[in-house]
Image (tube, rainbow, N blue to C red):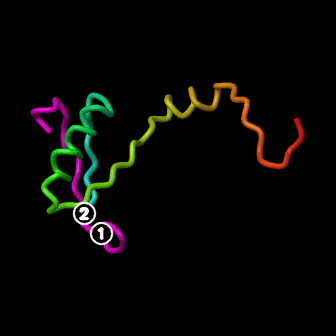
Amino acid sequence: MKSLKGKLESMHFALGSDDVVLIVDAPDNTAIAALSLSVGQTGLVRVRTTPLLTVEEADQALAMSTKYRAPGQGK
């Protein structure tokens, strides 16, 4: 994480579909994609990333107007 200017916040062992969960703070999604690709290409570890939103980011998303119309609903 240091080479990506990020930080490992915590590491957890889990039961279920994931054996290990890492919480990291990275400068952006591109940095995490670089890490994910370099780790995954070894074939030794399967990587799955889940970007988390801050409360402020969620508030910004909720404030955005979208034009979504559910399937089957009228125009």
x 84%, y 49%: residue:
72
Q: Is residue 58 magenta?
A: no
Asked if the residue under mark 1 is in contact with the one under mark 2, i.e. CB atoms within 8 Å, the reply is yes
Indicate the quadrant containing the C terminus: top left, top right, bottom left or bottom right.
top right
Residue with the most extreme left position? 3
Q: Earlier in the sequence, mark 2 or mark 1?
A: 1
Q: Amino acid at mark 2?
A: Val
Residue 22 drawn at (x, y percent):
25, 53
Q: Is residue 60 above or below residue 55?
A: above
- The three-letter amino acid code for the residue at tag 1 is Ala
Quadrant the N terminus occupies = top left
- Helix, strand or loop at disc 1? loop
**Residue located 77% across and 45% down the image:** 70
Q: Which residue is mark 1?
A: 14
Is 71 located above or below residue 12 in the figure?
above
- Kindly identify which residue carries mark 2: 20
- Residue 46, compared with residue 36, is above or below; it is below
Q: Position of residue 29 (x, y in %)?
A: 33, 34
Q: Nearer the viewer, residue 54 or 72?
A: 72
Q: Residue furthest right?
A: 74
Question: Residue 65, image x and y in percent?
Answer: 69, 25
Residue 47, quarter of the rendered image: bottom left
Q: CA distance from mark 2 to mark 1?
A: 6 Å
Q: Which residues are magenta?
A: 1-19
Residue 53: image quadrant is top left
The local crowd at label 2, few if under 14, some if 14 to 19, many if 20 or more residues have their Cα within 10 Å, is: few
Helix, strand or loop at label 2? It is strand
Is residue 15 on the magenta stretch? Answer: yes
Give whichever of 9, 62 is nearer the camera.
62
In the picture, measured across the screen, residue 28 lies left or right of residue 59, that is left
- Residue at the location (38% across, 48% down)? 50
